[in-house]
Image: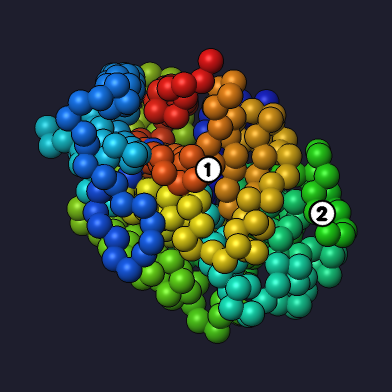
Amino acid sequence: MTRHRHHHSQPQAARRLLAALVGTATLAVAASAVAGTSHHPPPRLQPDGQAVQKDQAAHTRTQAVLDQIVAQGTPGVIAQVRDRHGVWDGRAGVRKLGSERPRSTHERFRVASVTKTFTATVLLKLEAEGKLSLDDSVAKWLPGVVRGNGYRPGHITVRHLLNHTSGIFDYNMDAGFRARYAGEEFDRNRYTRWSPRELVDIALAHPPNFQPEQGSRPGRPGEWDYSDTNYVLAGMVIEKASGCSYARAVERLVIRPLGLRGTSVPDTVPGLPAPHARHYSTLFEDGPQAKVRDVTEFSPTVAFSAGQLISTVGDVNTFLSSLLAGDLLPPAQQRQLLDAVPVDGDKGHGGPEDVYGLGLRHFKLAEGCWAWGHGGMIPGSATRTLAAADGRQVMTMNRNGDWGEQRLEDAAVESEFCRSAP
């Protein structure tokens, strides 16, 4: 139930159902200090200077976009930008419908598919520890799990999972699964606990989209398909290779080293830790008469290692900044992280020139303007996070509603990252 946004030829309601059930991306970064890391701390804002004036002009434009997002019906939105001049916080709207309490950049929220970047980082760190190789097959680590219906688990590697070149069907595309979380069905199923194996089995009832390429360079153009099943399997590999739970592995290898105090892996806990905004969804009706429901609580097992993490804009910014700066991974794993393959332009936020690494997408925002990051959407929460190639500029944004026009988020991102683009 976590997926990046994408543009399909399906009806709009069906597209949004898929997106909100699985996850996309957010712009937000908190200013909390991070202990014990070598990431780039935000300097103080300078009182004057042409560069600062340009930054402030960009922030003013971004704030206007946030106001417009709320004016179009989203309950509330927060954004945090960290760059060479400091930290800027933006916000608009409320954390709870019917109240006047504003949203805050200290809030915790479901990051949805931004979880995938954490999952990929954990697997790369396990490889650096000698626990596994990204070229290991799924059959080696999960014997008997991927089977039947034309699947060849001995030919599917961990790397294929992480860059979405495995061809494994996305369980979130299963009509029966989606129906469980649409409209009134959501309340009947919101506390249902899923095992990772059950999610994988939903996917395996469908044949593969394609067979992965064999050899040192997986994924040919046209053979890429975003699938949450890939990352559920990746989490299962983490548990096998590390000998501990997915939650404990993320805590040991990412959360604790970076001091991410607002980040947690909820496992089976349906609620959100304080402070948090209420999360709202239309589940997933279209039009002005669509009913808005409070979906703050539901079982995160529906997303597992593909989209269950909870975090803050500041923590996500710290993580992505550190990752791109090369502070989290040894050089060999850093090269693999950014070794990207072409994507199908119809299968994600962005355009046909984008490429996908391991849990990271390289977005072409405008001509001459690129950034690394990920998006995520899950019922009630839409997130996007992006960073410059060196990690020194980073932005995370979150909406506590899963409807509205994506072009406004695009405008906010471009305002911050494309200041010098033609």
Up the image or down, 122 lies above or below 376; here it is below
Identify the residue at the far left of this view: 100
375 lies left or right of 81: right
Disc on the earlier residue, 2 or 1:
2
Dividing the picture into quadrants, the one containing residue 310 is bottom left
**Marks 2 and 1, how far apart at CA:** 23 Å
Question: 122 and 401: which one is in front?
Answer: 122
Give the residue drawn at x 83%, y 44%. Answer: 220
Q: Residue pushed farthest front? A: 49
| Residue matched to label 2 | 217
Foreground tag (2 vs 1): 1
Number of numbered discs on residues: 2
Q: Position of residue 397 (x, y in %)?
A: 36, 38
Above or below residue 398? Residue 130 is: below
Colour mode of the rendering: rainbow
Q: Which of 28 and 282 is in front in this view?
A: 28
Q: Residue furthest bottom?
A: 243
The part of the image, by quadrant, that contains residue 74 is top left
Q: In which quarter of the image is residue 235?
A: bottom right
| Residue 388 seen from this side | yes
- Does residue 311 sit above or below 266 in this rendering? above
Q: Disc 1 designates what residue?
A: 389
What's the amino acid at mark 1?
Ala
Q: What element carries label 2?
A: loop
User: Which residue is drawn at the image coordinates 59% and 21% (left, top)?
Assistant: 367
Q: Position of residue 284 (x, y in %)?
A: 47, 34
| 10 Å crowding of disc 2: few (<14), some (14-19), many (20+) | few
* Residue 172: image location, x then y, percent: 60, 48
How packed is label 1: few (under 14 Cα within 10 Å), some, or many (20 or more)? some
Say which amino acid is labelled 2: Arg
